[in-house]
Image: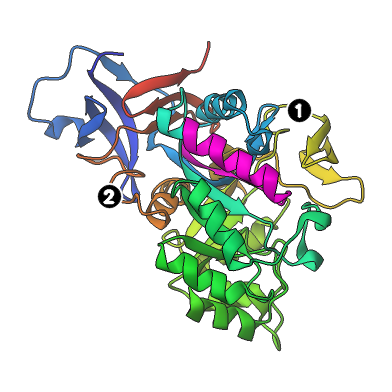
């Protein structure tokens, strides 16, 4: 693809579908996005016309463990590169490499690997940070995390992992009711790390205390946390009540019923609800038996489960999450796209650079067809995926 080019077709931009739209890209940046007949300059020599589907901002997955047979916890450059390439096939242009509960020695190796290789750049989606999910969680709400490796968030351990990540830890999932958690939350907040309540048995009162201490996000809402009850709102109630805070949703129609997906969307709005995949290595691989942190996972009927039936992450991709919000929950396409692009980008502090089709933004672009398949993906203006015909 030339340094300067244009895409013509239906745009999903700034909360609307724009027919006869145009996106012009130069040197990795969007120089124009709007109606084609309002572009007052000569078009670039290379123009791609999208006949079927939508031109969207690139998707940002702030919670994903693996895909296409690879996992962040593999701790190798090859694995991170393979994840990057596979994500681009599903419209993701930026992601947080997400860890899981493991011995500290393994986590340290993984963090060093991500820090070294993400800064060198990847061939597909770019790793813009790390989501540390575990080991500081509640054993009773561990989900598919290994209980033997769950730990108390002692401040020296928190500080060491943060240092090894070279500042790339952007999100930390923590159970705020655990011993010493509030001290860790306060320390992370001072460093602008997004502290997320997840895998938690907190009461509503404990969750609210944690919000006061620095929690400002909720990990995969409804899953691995205390549910909403009319006499004890729990963590789900806290996620809904604290309207200024952001929340994740695994929109596969399995982790959360489509009706509840829409209820959460109505409460949080697209501005505060981020679609995530929470995908594990089985994503994009089909049915079979896989490994997740040393545990056997069986994939059948689009569900990934441990032997005991516990949901073990997902095999969801963000293009399917967008499609599910539209087809299963009746959400508008612009709002569904926003929840997969601008919302997570803004939560992570990239809202002035990523997640919009607008002049001055990074040319991170995803093209969807009407079946929500990804046909093209661009990262910083470079085409990193083109669907074969």
Percent position of residue 33, x then y: 23, 36
Q: Which mark is residue 352?
A: 2
299 relative to 346 in the view: left or right:
right
Q: Is residue 93 visible?
A: no
- In the image shown, does 40 or 180 lie closer to the viewer? 180
Q: What residue is rendered at 69% in x and 42% in y?
A: 106
The percent position of residue 212, horizontal first and vertical second, equals 49, 81
- At which x and y percent is residue 195? 52, 64
Magenta region: 93-117
Residue at 20% from the left image edge and 40% from the top image edge: 360
Residue visible at 69% across and 57% down in the picture:
135
The residue singled out by tag 1 in the image is: 286
Q: Nearer the viewer, residue 164 or 96?
A: 164
Q: Is residue 76 visible?
A: yes
Residue 233: percent from the left, percent from the top?
66, 81
Which one is in front in this view, the residue at disc 2 or the one at disc 1? 2
């Amino acid at each position: 693809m030339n340094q300067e080019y244009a895409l013509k077709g239906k745009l999903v931009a700034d909360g609307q579908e724009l027919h006869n739209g145009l996106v012009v890209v130069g040197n990795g940046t969007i120089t124009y996005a709007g109606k084609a007949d309002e572009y007052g300059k000569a078009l670039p020599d290379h123009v791609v016309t999208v006949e079927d589907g939508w031109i969207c901002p690139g998707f940002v997955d702030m919670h994903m463990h693996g895909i296409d047979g690879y996992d962040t916890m593999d701790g190798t450059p090859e694995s991170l590169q393979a994840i990057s390439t596979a994500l681009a096939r599903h419209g993701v242009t930026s992601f947080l490499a997400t860890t899981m509960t493991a011995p500290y020695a393994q986590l340290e190796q993984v963090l060093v690997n991500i820090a070294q290789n993400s800064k060198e750049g990847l061939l597909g989606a770019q790793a813009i940070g790390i989501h540390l999910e575990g080991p500081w969680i509640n054993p009773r709400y561990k989900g598919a995390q290994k209980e033997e490796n769950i730990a108390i968030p002692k401040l020296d351990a928190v500080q060491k992992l943060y240092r090894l990540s070279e500042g790339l830890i952007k999100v930390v999932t923590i159970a705020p009711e655990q011993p010493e958690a509030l001290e860790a939350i306060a320390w992370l907040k001072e460093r602008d790390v997004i502290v997320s309540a997840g895998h938690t048995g907190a009461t509503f009162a404990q969750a609210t205390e944690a919000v006061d201490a620095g929690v400002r996000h909720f990990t995969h809402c409804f899953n691995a946390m205390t549910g909403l009850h009319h006499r004890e709102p729990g963590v789900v109630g806290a996620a809904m009540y604290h309207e200024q805070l952001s929340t994740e949703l695994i929109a596969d129609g399995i982790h959360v019923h489509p009706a509840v997906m829409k209820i959460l969307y109505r409460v949080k709005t697209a501005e505060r609800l981020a679609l995530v995949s929470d995908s594990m290595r089985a994503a994009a691989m089909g049915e079979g038996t896989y490994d997740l942190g040393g545990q056997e996972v069986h994939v059948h009927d689009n569900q990934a489960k441990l032997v005991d039936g516990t949901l073990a992450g997902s095999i969801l991709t963000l293009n399917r999450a967008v499609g599910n919000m539209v087809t299963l929950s009746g959400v508008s396409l612009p709002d569904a796209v926003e929840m997969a692009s601008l919302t997570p980008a803004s939560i992570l502090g990239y809202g002035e650079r990523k997640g919009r089709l607008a002049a001055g933004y990074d040319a991170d672009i995803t093209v969807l067809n009407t079946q929500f398949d990804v046909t093209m993906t661009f990262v910083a203006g470079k085409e990193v995926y083109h669907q074969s015909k």
